[in-house]
Amino acid sequence: NTRALIDNLVRSNAGTRVSGNQRRITVQNAPALLTTLQSRSPYGQTEVDVLVTVQTRDGLVYAVFIAPQNDYRNAEPVFQEMLRTLRVR
């Protein structure tokens, strides 16, 4: 489930934390959760990690979109377009 995935990401990536509330969204007409996390990039910057999870009959499908915090506003429309075109079976 999404909570277990988030816990695993936080545990395995030092400095990663949830930075906002989860939002319910839809991906290809399926209910999904969007969770924003922050972490330290290998380059010393803070990065925004946007986790999108969709529960399917076969299990949890997820995507992570990553951008430096300073560039997130420019990257967000690209993430939205990628999400719009994502196909989940």
Image: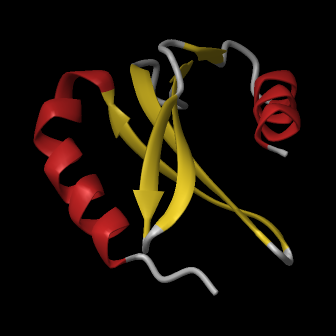
Q: Give the image quarter of residue 31.
A: bottom right
Q: Residue 67's x, y, as percent?
A: 34, 39
Q: Pick whichever, 46 or 51, lies toward us.
A: 51
18 and 21: which one is in front?
A: 21
Which quadrant is the C terminus positioned in? bottom right
Indicate the position of residue 78 as horizontal and vertical percent values: 20, 58
Q: Is residue 70 found left or right of 16 in the rendered image?
A: left
Residue 29 pos. (x, y %): 44, 70
Q: Is residue 69 above or below residue 9?
A: above
Q: Give the colour scheme shown.
A: secondary structure
> How many numbered tags mark residues here?
0
Task: Quadrant for the N terminus, please.
Answer: top right
The residue furthest bottom is 89
Q: Quadrant of residue 70?
A: top left
Residue at position x 53%, y 26% in the image: 22
Q: Residue at x 75, y 18 (%)?
A: 14
Q: Residue furthest left?
A: 74
Q: From the viewer's perspective, is residue 5 above or below residue 21?
A: below
Q: Going by the image, does 77 lie left or right of 52?
A: left
Q: Is residue 12 left or right of residue 69?
A: right
Residue nearer the viewer, 1 or 48: 1
Q: Residue at x 32, y 31 (%)?
A: 68
Q: Position of residue 88 (x, y in %)?
A: 57, 80
